[in-house]
Image (tube, helix red, strand yellow):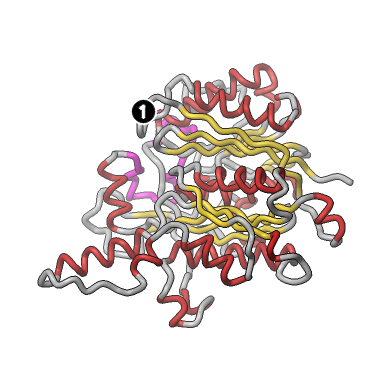
Amino acid sequence: MTGLGAITPIGNTVSAYWDGLSQGVSGAAPITRFDASKFKTRFACEVKGYSPDDYFPTKEGRKMDIFTQFALIASDEAIKDAGIDEGVDKDRVGVIWGSGIGGLTSLQAECIAFAKGDGTPRFNPFFIPKMIADSASGNISIRHKFRGPNFVTTSACASSSDSIISAFNYIRLNMADVMVTGGSEAAVTESGVGGFNALKAMSERNDAPEVASRPYDKERDGFVLGEGSGALVLEEYEHAKARGAKIYAELIGGGMSADAYHITAPDPEGNGVMLVMKNALRDAGISPEEVDYINTHGTSTPLGDGAEIKAIEKVFGEHAYNLNISSTKSMTGHLLGGAGGIEAVAAILAMQHSLVPPTINHFTDDPELDPRLNFTFNQAQAREVNVAMSNTFGFGGHNTSVIFRKFKE
């Protein structure tokens, strides 16, 4: 990994994001993007102080959905950080991006406008390119003239992590030297909030939104919707070395699996999650005892949190008690298809700073969870992190794990 980028509910650059993570900042607040007064959930983790005019010429910004804007902002930071805009063969640089929903803001706006009209089809000529999920990867490649493999992965909340593994494999297959990867999401809309409310998936703690995302707490009542983007530049080692690039970490393995259980609910025994972590460990060629930190999926849902912890205990055995476990969704909320991107960045930064970001908002122990496990509750913990795993799981039973190792010459 030679470049990192982020725009998140707790910081609009990588350094600001890390400050928020390490300090345990909550990104949850009342929704400002629309009038949510009649919704069951009236808060979210929005990107703060965001205006597209701060990043794009007005005409350019109007041609892109906000999820694509977030993708360009994070990828621009990662590309600049890696220094790959000049002096590399752009035929060998690709973009594989992740988004679970794509241009929901644009889709909703156009459908509402049509419904309010007289039935005459008057649609924005940019509607389709704004709405389709692959506009993110397409715009990144066009902006930087990267002509290598280019597509978007869509697997609900596992989308970004699947994009990272796909990028990893394209380099392993010698189809690219460098891949820009990660994911973005912007679903804080009436349809996004209303839809997840209908599923009874989101917290309704409107009286105290800043403490609503509370993974592993007995009183957790659902996830908090987030938005933003995380980007990474993944580069073949000899290529990076030859150009003198700084290297943050190595991506050493990735695993995928399916719950094959239910379209929205996790397997309560965590069988698919066990399988995905075993697959990732096998691909990385390491033992469970070599992992120091797991950035968990940990969405703050009653069923999902428990299933993941059951799986961790079964895969890691006694070593589970030596791990640091934390859910950064307690601070950022759940970015859906963008979650894997910002959480991979968090795992890499934990290695860089020898500091595990916390699981904030813990008030009451869950008697169903083993108290001997180190959930890194409420405060960051200093620790040498040589190997970190990041888990992301999505509706449809999609499970993905990626494993990073601190880079050493």
Q: Which residue is mark 1?
A: 262
Q: Is residue 147 above or below residue 349?
A: below
Q: Quadrant of residue 118?
A: bottom left
Residue at the spot 73% in from the left edge and 52% down from the top edge: 1
Q: Is residue 378 left or right of residue 171?
A: left
Q: Main secondary structure of the magenta part?
A: loop
Q: Position of residue 307 (x, y in %)?
A: 47, 25
User: What residue range appears in magenta?
Assistant: 201-220
137 inside magenta stretch: no
Q: Is residue 50 left or right of residue 249?
A: left
Q: Is residue 54 above or below residue 194?
A: below
Residue at the spot 81% in from the left edge and 50% down from the top edge: 237
Q: Is residue 296 left or right of residue 203?
A: right
208 inside magenta stretch: yes
Residue at the spot 59% in from the left edge and 18% down from the top edge: 314
Dot 1 amino acid type? His
Per the image, label 1 sits on a secondary structure element best described as loop
Q: Is residue 389 above or below residue 369?
A: below
